[in-house]
Amino acid sequence: MNVSNEPVEILLVEDDPGDVLITQEALADSKFLNHLAVVSNGEEALKYLRLESPYEDAVRPGLILLDLNLPRIDGREVLAQIKADPGLRRIPVVVLTTSAADEDIIRSYDLHANAYVTKPVDFDQFINVVRKVDEFYISIVKLPPR
């Protein structure tokens, strides 16, 4: 539980500008303090997490929202690299994707995703899903210290 009321850093890895806007709107209306950083492809996500240029001053996120279908390095590979890295593997990763395919769900959990959420196509339902993920990970789950 985020009892300290310190803002939680959330990294959104999403290439669809519409989904980025919906997620930003959902989190902006949240009753929880958080900061949202956004990168639009898997390569940038890994640079951000490894504090590589141009992200040397980035704050390590307490939660990652990860799309699977990304340019450059796809989300499955990003997830695999995060969970294989001792410095990153404790960061909870929620796969937030349009895919409801069994093979994507199974592979994501095999790669140690913390949750798998299929994006609703309906705007209001999408907002609701993002808010519930935020509420669960920010108010209920005890996140690892940074």
Image: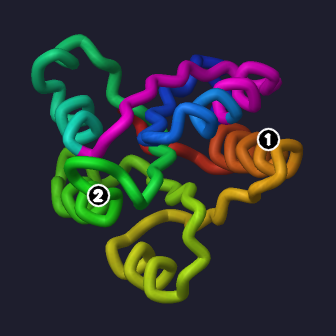
The number of numbered discs placed on residues in the rendered structure image is 2
Residue at 46% across / 53% down in the picture? 67
Tell me which corner region of the image, top left, top right, bottom left or bottom right, holds residue 27: top right
Q: Residue at x 81, y 22 (%)?
A: 29
Left or right, residue 59 beside residue 33 = left
Would you say 56 lies left or right of 45 here? left
Residue kind at label 2, given as amino acid type: Asp
At numbered mark 2, what does the secondary structure look like: helix, strand or loop? loop
Tell me the kind of residue under disc 1.
Ile
- The percent position of residue 61, horizontal first and vertical second, equals 41, 32
- Residue 79 is a magenta residue: no
Q: Nearer the viewer, residue 7 or 97?
A: 97
Q: Is residue 3 left or right of residue 122?
A: left
Residue tagged by mark 1? 127
Where residue 30 appears, x then y in whole percent? 78, 26
- Decide: is 104 above or below 44: below
Residue 74, label in figure: 2
> What is the span of residues highlighted in magenta in the rendered image?
23-42
Looking at the picture, tell me which residue is in the foreground, 13 or 140. Answer: 13
- Say which quarter of the image contains residue 83: bottom left
The residue positioned 66% from the left and 34% from the top of the image is 23
Q: Earlier in the sequence, mark 2 or mark 1?
A: 2
Q: Residues within 10 Å of mark 1 (few under 14, many from 20)?
A: many
Rendered view: 112 above or below 11: below
In the displayed orientation, state which residue is furthest to the right.
124
